[in-house]
Amino acid sequence: MSTHTELITTHGRPQRRPGRRFIGAQLVLGLLLVYFLVPFYWIVINSSKDAAGLFGGGSALWFADSIDYLGNLQTLFTYNGGIYLQWIGNSAFYALTGGVGATILCVLAGYGFAKYRFRGRTFTFSLLLGAVMVPLTALVIPTFIMLSQLNLTNTVWSVILPSLLNPFGVYLMTVFARDAVPDELLDAARVDGAGELRTFVQVALPLMRPAIVTVLLLSIVATWNNFFLPLAMLQNNRLFPVTVGINQWQSLAAANNGGGTSLWSLIIIGSLVSIVPLVIAFLSLQRYWQGGLSMGSLK
Amino acid sequence: MTSTTLAQPRPRAGIATARRRHTLVGWAFVAPFAIVFVVFLIAPLAYAFYLSLFRKALIGGTQFVWFENYLKAFTDEHFLSGVWFVLTFSVVLIPVQMLVSLAIALILDVVTTRFARFSRLMIFLPYAIPVVIGALMWGFLYSKNFGPLGELFGLFGANAPDFLSPQLIFFGLLNVVTWQWAGYYMIILYAALQGIDPSIYEAARIDGANNWQIAVRIKVPMITNSLVLILVFALIGTLQFFNEPMMLKFLAAGTIGPDFTPNMYAYQQAFALANFNYGSAISFALGIVVFICVYIFMLATRKRGGFLG
């Protein structure tokens, strides 16, 4: 496993000469860094403010007189019977079930496409490549109508089941499995008497691990970030993921400008809290996705 | 990639039985995905097409109207203005986004300091943020109530631009999308650059090429496949534009109407007006148009080793 991780992260290339500084280029990078981090900075600062701090005319880029993260967090977690925590929990639940489910389907199908010459494979695979180009939001409205006839809308299934579809993930797994799992190894396992399933689990799966982690991460992020699908499917706000929930708060806050002012501080700290899990996941798993993200384009 | 060369058959005795077994086991592996594919991709598309051929009237119930909904869509100002917006938006956004991500990737490919590695991580970070939250954060920064633009421009005695106004919302959205995706595209390009054999650069340097020439004449041509891939991703994403304007419409009161993009219009038709037939027609038309545009583009830029191979 470690050899393959290295293979896709460094491509066997020797390290470049260290010590070359490129002052101008680094200055450009510094400016870009400021640009990319400004929204994070703003949201961290303004999460500390109450309505008075937000609307009181103080600087938007610095703290107001009262810095009250804990108070805002407490209001956030208790507002409307703790609905925010419910939303976060829902998001995590949808992301894990949808993401893990989608990844399992991708791994199985990718291995099947890469390692078996079955009848209809060429046709199915070109259908899959075509599907990568279908904008998935175009499917939301018809899927909604289909599921509503089965009385499945406004349930967790209406969010999880469509999330299992990830044609690009299958494509990535196919490309990766084709190169990373040698046919000779599979044949050797078969000659030794291992069945097809056992060959897959014990020989192929470990070799495919770097791609599995990448597809898993991409699927989880896609489901966690999904907005159109749950927005269309769900009416019960107890089932909302956090993206749809914050959107609802925002429409409430915008609708009654005067009475809604306190909601804005909840929206701001709520946005901050909702991005923390993904930021941590990305920073801690970087050695996986950095190599993995390039797989589709290198081949 | 050439899909026909996947898994060459190995010569062996009993080829017929081996083939049958391959077909059976191969399908067993592909089946779970194939079921989801049929149920949640083929079926909705077919169903959307079917629905789009009907019209529901208050008097007379549901009628089969052939392609009337499509004729209506392509003469419907609301739909056409949305289409015009996403097309102009793609034409401006995609080159900007690709140039930004390519420039960063090229810089990161030569600068290998700790600061550069840190920047790479931070520039990628917006990809991990839900689009909805990213749009909201920028909406706050643009806003007169919460944003710093008034203060900053006030320092120079100037009036702050209002990126939530009808005149500037185009650029406001342009900035949000670039911020959100440039890092992701940068990582794809960066990884492709890292995959180039560095001995090529040595050869070029001996021939007297400087860093700039190496970047423009060697590196960029060698990562064409990756550039095409991100262009296709950007095209598919932009034509179905929905989340960002949907989120900013509350902060930009009056600027973003329900027909701002085709997808928002389809959403309004289906969910606000319960006009599922017309909504389906718009969805289907959008899906097909995107698919055809992208397919033609991919065929036109096809190279050996490309996505469609």
Image (tube, rainbow, N blue to C red):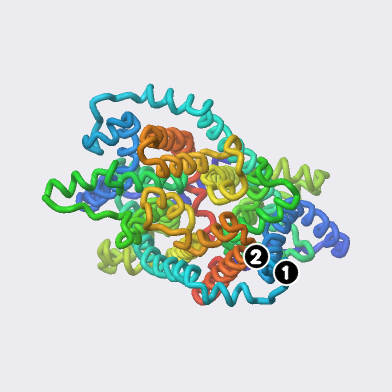
Q: Chain of mark 2?
A: B
Which residue is located at x 25 percent, y 30 percent? A63
Please name the amino acid that badge 1 sits on. Answer: Gly
Near mark 1 (Cα within 10 A), the count class, few <14, some 14-19 or many ≥20, is: few
Asked whether, in this view, residue B296 is left or right of residue B8, the answer is: left
Residue A41's label in the rendered image is: none
Among the two numbered marks 2 and 1 on one chain, the one whose residue lies closer to the N terminus = 1
Quickly name the residue at label 2. B277
Which residue is located at x 58 percent, y 67 percent? B282
Same chain for labels 2 and 1? Say yes or no.
yes
**Nearer to us in this view, B173 or B55:** B55
Q: Quadrant of residue B182?
A: bottom left
Which numbered mark, 2 or 1, is in the foreground of this view? 1
Residue A188 image position (x, y, % from top left): 75, 49
Near mark 2 (Cα within 10 A), the count class, few <14, some 14-19 or many ≥20, is: many
Q: Chain of mark 1?
A: B
Please name the amino acid that badge 2 sits on. Answer: Asn
Does the CB distance between marks 2 and 1 fall below 8 Å? no
Res. B201 visible in picture:
no
Quickly name the residue at label 1. B60
User: Quadrant where the C terminus of chain B lies?
Assistant: bottom right
Residue B161 image position (x, y, % from top left): 24, 55
**Nearer to us in this view, B149 or A189:** B149
**Residue B162, above or below A65:** below
Res. B279 visible in picture:
yes
Which element carries disc 1, helix, strand or loop?
Answer: loop
Residue B209 image position (x, y, % from top left): 27, 67
**Nearer to us in this view, A96 or B109:** A96
